[in-house]
Each structure stands twice: as structure tokens, then as C-alpha cells.
């Protein structure tokens, strides 16, 4: 676990400013510019990102797609569609875990050794922060245990509550 812990961290920052190989966008199924982190990423990347997303088309919940980062410091944007929270009985944890795994697989397959994630589905999609963070950290840790091509994953948190939740889950790995 020691080696794994060195490959994971949590920070409070604006994901659009991070110099990493790939940032993950908490996207909608249409891959259209939206609000929250999705809107911020689209604004920072420029209109080319929306055009690239239109060319891809739809992305079902739990899946991910990759585009260039355009005007962002990140080379890539990985668009992951998390589930809308309906109380947890509609497969939300499995869908959320799938969007993290699929994002990391795309990163590894495209040579992205450093990846930053927002707290997917915890905004307007209503997924409870603590539950979502537990799924995110456990899923990423399990994936990294078998994937040496990704050297570092950062949980990029918006606000102190998200940062505290991420740090608690990361500490529990040790």
C-alpha cells in the first residue's frame, strides 16, 4: 500500500489550471457544455472542445471518452458520465466506479501518466459526497494496483468538505 499511497493525492484547486496529462470532466451523456466543473472545463479549453465532443456524440452513464485538452494545460480531457443519484438502489455505485475505471483505462491507453479527477456526480447529480468519495478512492486504488502506466492520480477537490472527505479516504488506504 505504501507505493500506492505515493501515487494518490488530494488537493483543493481549480482543475482547469492543473498541469497533468489528463483531467477528467464530470460530463453529461450529450458531452455538451454544462454547469459546474463541466462548464468551467469547456470555457477554459475553448470552443474546440465542444466541437470535438459533438463529433463524438453520446456517452452513456458509466462510460468515458477522450479529447485533446485544446487550450488547457492538460494534454487530454477525459469525459466521464457519472450517475444521477436516486437513492443508491439503481446501480449508482457500480456506474460511478465504472466511470472512474473507464477514465483510467483511457488515460493509460493514451499515454497519460498523470490524471486529475473532480468529485464526479456530487454536484447537480446529487450523489452524496462521502459515498461518492469512498467509491472513487477505492476504485482508483484498485485500478492503480494493477496498472503501472499511471504514475499519479490527483483528486482535485472543490471546497474544504470535498478535500476532507478525500483525505479521509486516502488515509484509510494506508
Image (spheres, helix red, strand yellow):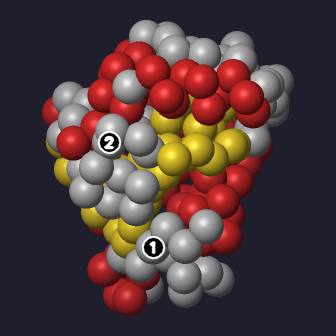
| Disc assigned to residue 113 | 1
Look at the picture and state if 19 lies above or below 162. below
Look at the picture and state if 14 lies above or below 104. above
- For the N terminus, the quadrant is bottom left
**Whole-percent x, y for residue 104 in the image:** 60, 61
Can residue 66 be seen here? yes
| Residue 119 location, quadrant | top left
Look at the picture and state if 112 lies above or below 121. below
Discs 1, 2 touching: Cβ within 8 Å: no
Could you tell me which residue is drawn at 74 percent across and 38 percent down? 62
Answer with left or right where residue 70 lies relative to residue 127. left
- For the C terminus, the quadrant is bottom left
| Residue 114 location, quadrant | bottom left
Within-10-Å neighbours for mark 1: few <14, some 14–19, many 20+: some
SS state under label 1: loop
CA gap, disc 1 to disc 2? Answer: 17 Å
Q: Nearer the viewer, residue 9 or 27?
A: 27
**Whole-percent x, y for residue 165 in the image:** 32, 43
Q: Nearer the viewer, residue 168 or 54?
A: 54
Could you tell me which residue is drawn at 28 percent across and 49 percent down? 73
Residue corresponding to mark 2: 72
Amino acid at each position: 500500500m505504501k507505493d500506492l499511497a505515493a501515487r494518490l493525492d488530494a488537493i483543493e484547486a481549480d482543475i482547469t489550471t492543473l498541469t497533468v496529462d489528463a483531467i477528467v470532466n464530470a460530463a453529461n451523456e450529450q458531452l455538451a457544455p454544462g454547469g459546474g466543473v463541466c462548464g468551467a472545463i469547456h470555457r477554459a479549453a475553448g470552443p474546440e472542445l465542444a466541437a470535438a465532443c459533438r463529433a463524438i456524440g453520446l456517452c452513456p452513464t458509466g462510460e468515458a471518452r477522450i479529447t485533446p485538452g485544446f487550450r488547457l494545460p492538460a494534454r487530454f480531457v477525459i469525459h466521464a458520465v457519472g450517475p444521477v443519484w436516486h437513492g443508491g438502489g439503481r446501480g449508482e455505485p457500480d456506474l460511478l466506479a465504472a466511470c472512474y475505471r473507464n477514465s483510467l483505462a483511457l488515460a493509460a491507453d493514451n499515454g497519460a501518466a498523470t490524471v486529475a479527477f473532480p468529485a464526479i456526480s456530487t454536484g447537480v447529480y446529487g450523489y452524496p459526497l462521502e459515498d461518492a468519495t469512498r467509491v472513487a478512492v477505492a476504485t482508483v486504488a484498485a485500478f492503480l494496483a494493477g496498472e503501472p502506466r499511471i504514475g499519479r492520480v490527483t483528486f482535485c477537490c472543490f471546497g474544504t468538505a470535498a478535500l476532507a472527505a478525500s483525505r479521509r479516504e486516502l488515509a484509510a488506504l494506508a
